[in-house]
Amino acid sequence: MLSAIKEKVDSILTNHKYEKKELITIIQEIQKEYNYLPEDALTYMADCLDISHSKIYGVATFYENFSLEAKGKNIIKICDGTACHVRKSVPILNAIYKELGLSDKKKTTDDLLFTVETVSCLGACGLAPVITINDHVHPKMTPESTIELLKAMKREEE
């Protein structure tokens, strides 16, 4: 295991006094740190808390907000709920996939800059079609406006 992961997990565990009842909060903080749940971090945490690896894995896979796969720096969520779907969210998703070289099987860019997720509802139906990028709402999107937004973000990263 990388000593940097061990050091960070130790810090998180210390903040929670190694309390097993803080398990979900600890996992949330690990995910916040790495943008996903590295296997090494979960294994080390399980050993430190004397909790079985299978229990940790069960918690990490039960909750939809936890991810065992590396995610990009920028999380793009595209709504495919009824309001967004009828207002053409699918062409937006397809434009994002094409622009970033992604698909329904490959959700994260190789440079770990973007991850694309479809969600059932973002709770902004009156603004449909909607995407969020890092929880910032972008209303009434089109494939063209979405591509321009992505290009601007890429330029900022250069």
Image: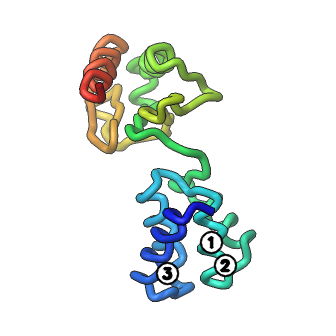
Q: Report the front residue among 39 and 134.
A: 39
Label 2–label 1 contact, CB within 8 A: yes
Q: Report the front residue among 18 and 77.
A: 18
Q: Which mark is residue 44?
A: 1
Query: Mark 3 — residue?
Result: 22
Q: Using a 10 Å C-alpha cutoff, classify the residue at mark 2 as few (fewer than 14 neighbours), some (14 to 19) or many (20 or more).
A: few
| SS class, disc 2 | helix
Q: Is 46 located above or below residue 72 in the figure?
A: below
**The C terminus: image quadrant:** top left
Q: Using a 10 Å C-alpha cutoff, classify the residue at mark 1 as few (fewer than 14 neighbours), some (14 to 19) or many (20 or more).
A: some
For badge 1, the amino acid type reads Tyr
- Residue depicted at x 42% and y 58%: 32
* Furthest residue toward front: 3
In this image, 70 relative to 57: left or right?
left
In this image, 89 relative to 126: left or right?
right
Circle nearer the N terminus (3, 2): 3
Q: Nearer the viewer, mark 3 or mark 1?
A: 1
| SS class, disc 1 | helix
